[in-house]
Amino acid sequence: MTAITTIIESPIALVCIDNPPVNAAGHDVRDGLVAALAELAGNDAVQVIALYAAGRTFVAGADIREFGQPPKPPMLPEVCDLLEESVKPVVCVLHGTTLGGGLELALGCHVRVGITGLKVGLPEVNLGLLPGAGGTQRLPRLVEGGTALTMITSGKPISAEAALEAGLLDALVDMKPEEAARMAAAQVLEGTLVPRVTADQPNRLGADDLDTFRAKSKGEVTERALQAAEASFLPIAEGMAAERALFLAALESDAHKGMKHAFFAERAVAHIPEAGAETRDLTSAGIVGGGTMGSGIATALLLAGLPVTLVETAAERVAFARDTITENLKGAVKRGKLSVDAFEATLGALICTTDIGALAEVDLVIEAVFESIDVKHQIFTQLDQICKAGAILATNTSYLDVNDIAACTTRPADVIGLHFFSPAHVMRLLEVVVGKDTAPEVVATSFKLAKRLRKVAVRAEVCDGFIGNRILSHYRRSTEYMQLDGAPFEQIDTALEAFGFAMGPFAVSDLAGLDISWATRKRQAATRPAAERYVDIADRICEQGWFGRKTGKGFYIYDAGTRRVNSEVATFAEAERASKGITARRFSDEEIVERYMAAMVVEAARVVEEKIALRPIDVDAVFLFGYGFPRHWGGPLQYADITGLATLVARIETYAQEDAHYWQVPGLLHELVSSGRRFADLNKG
Ligand code: 3HC
């Protein structure tokens, strides 16, 4: 199949781009367009060229899979220039998600017509890049400077209506792209649509615009994009050259490699062994447990248009759940996720009750009660008796054994773990925990549900804590060890925030509630290996009744919206060091990050080795979408590849000299180093 087809309807030539799934401007598209333009230039029967695309969208950007490969001319800037230089006017019809290189092609054309529902933008910064085919040069010549810089630096698309108002579109119509192409070309011939050469338009960017954006922006990615935009003050050819040089530099950056990995991670996780299985219809859902988590899950389901029946044990708990969900939905209205008009109907699809029998006819039940295996056994035994045949019975447990829970039903094939992350209506990650008897169609249906909820589902096998919490519970200890050995906790938080985490681990603990991890530590005390170092600074804090944010005091003190270090934590640390005969030493910020990341990679490698995760990229997705991992690093195992596995092994072996129990090199890491492979090699196939 050829990516470009041309139909001559003299005096109009219709040029169609057809490169599924998103018409990315890969080599075939670029080559085909150059050939079509050359042919049409010499065809006297053609006066106007109309460019449009087949399928769900006009070009959604350059082909990201080509980045990092040897360049294959013609390159995109050249194609955009050829469109602009065409003596015969070129109209372009945009539909779907016209993004990046797709918009840049359109900017090279002489007339742009949008189809209703279009979203148009320059998302390159989300890949650690900048528009590299004239976007930073031509856009400010079509729209007002602030609008251009917002699009270039935020990466967020704008609506068709906004694009029309800004002058990016010449017209907005509601018809099929091919018909719109025919109509727009005819209007150019009639003179009702007037072609313009974008490069000839005055630049609407002002030096003030750049100053404003520089003042509020941060990071190398945005700075590079602003430098490219600044080059639009130069004559267009020089500006284009400057933009291209910055784009090529960005292609080499670690930030781009990490963010490209994150882009593909979000999509790769959908490739699961059960992908081809039949799915079950989900038209209604039930929730058992209306705490913060259960209410959050209910909110997510309601926002996706599913009616929800929520079961709690007492009237006041029912009232709490209803109030929480109502507030969540109001928040969704404020954030533009739910229209004001749809609010009442969405809330109207919620039933809250104390009668578990109300779940008899729902297609899916998600249990979200507190983490007690006895309580879960009791609930699943009841659900087994009540729910209709074919209903999916899911548990939101964050670490308990899904097989054990399934075993107390007569239908373990219908039981699955659906592990949401709090706040469940906001966080994008959903760990889908597959039990030994879970039916493939139950897995496939869960992935379909995740898509409907706009979540990133990652397949996990059963183990304590699954992918995310298992790895977390390991690397979190590295911060306690560093604290005990002399690093102030606030230095650890600051160093990791500088690395890119939104919050340091101690600030996160305060937010989650210190009592929760205290309870876990108490429960684990009996089985804790004798060789394991135990740090009891957090226990001392909890003994004071300081459980973090909810009590106003934890590692930090929270007062009237401000946060300051709780100086008594240092006293507890000193006392513990004294009792263990430890002399405090200094840690550099770099060492803190290196130890933290090494600990994360160690457990992540074990999770891959034990096949708890399907591939390394699945682990990366869990951390990117559930644990605030910095996107520019692409995930812990992409970080490992970038850092170098041999370097990591050497670091772990050095740390092992002081604690050989905690710091052990996983077999997989040794194996990869000795075979000269990287984690990325395990993502293939
Ligand atoms: N290049 C290569 N593959 C792409 C792609 C692209 N630009 N955009 C999407 N794909 C692939 C996806 O990887 C996925 O592949 P898979 O099925 O094998 O996993 C498939 O197309 C479908 O994509 P989605 O699952 O994301 O489909 P959606 O319908 O949910 O979303 C979309 C469509 C909004 C277009 C979304 O895919 C997207 O945001 N794409 C990236 C857009 C982008 O970043 N463009 C800029 C590229 S950089 C550039 O243009 C540089 C230029 O300035 C020189």
Image (cartoon, grey):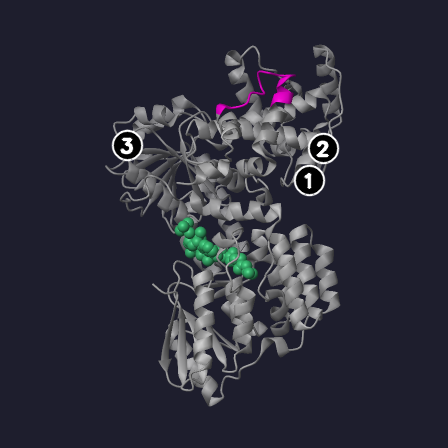
Instruction: Assess whether residue 656 is covered by the magenta stretch.
Output: yes
Q: Secondary structure at mark 3?
A: helix
Q: What residue is disc 1 on?
A: 498
Instruction: Determine whether label 2 and label 1 are within 8 Å by CB.
Output: yes
Q: Nearer the viewer, residue 232 or 397?
A: 232
The quadrant in which residue 199 appears is bottom right
Circle 3 residues within 10 Å: few <14, some 14–19, many ≥20 = many
Label 2 C-beta lies within 8 Å of the nearest ligand 1 atom: no
Kindly identify the residue that appears in the image at 50 percent across and 60 percent down.
61
Q: What residue is disc 2 on?
A: 589
Task: Give the dominant element type of the magenta stretch: helix, strand or loop.
Answer: loop
Q: CA distance from mark 2 to mark 1?
A: 9 Å
Residue 272 numbered mark, or none: none
* Amino acid type, callout 2: Asp
Q: What residue is disc 3 on?
A: 413
Kindly identify the residue that appears in the image at 37 percent across and 45 percent down.
449
* Amino acid type, callout 3: Ala
Instruction: Looking at the image, tell me whether mark 3 or mark 2 is earlier in sequence order.
Output: 3
Q: Position of residue 561 (x, y in %)?
A: 70, 41
Numbered range of the magenta stretch = 653-667
Q: Secondary structure at mark 1?
A: helix
Instruction: Determine whether label 3 and label 1 are within 8 Å by CB.
Output: no
Q: Position of residue 193 (x, y in %)?
A: 50, 84
Q: CA distance from mark 3 to mark 1?
A: 45 Å
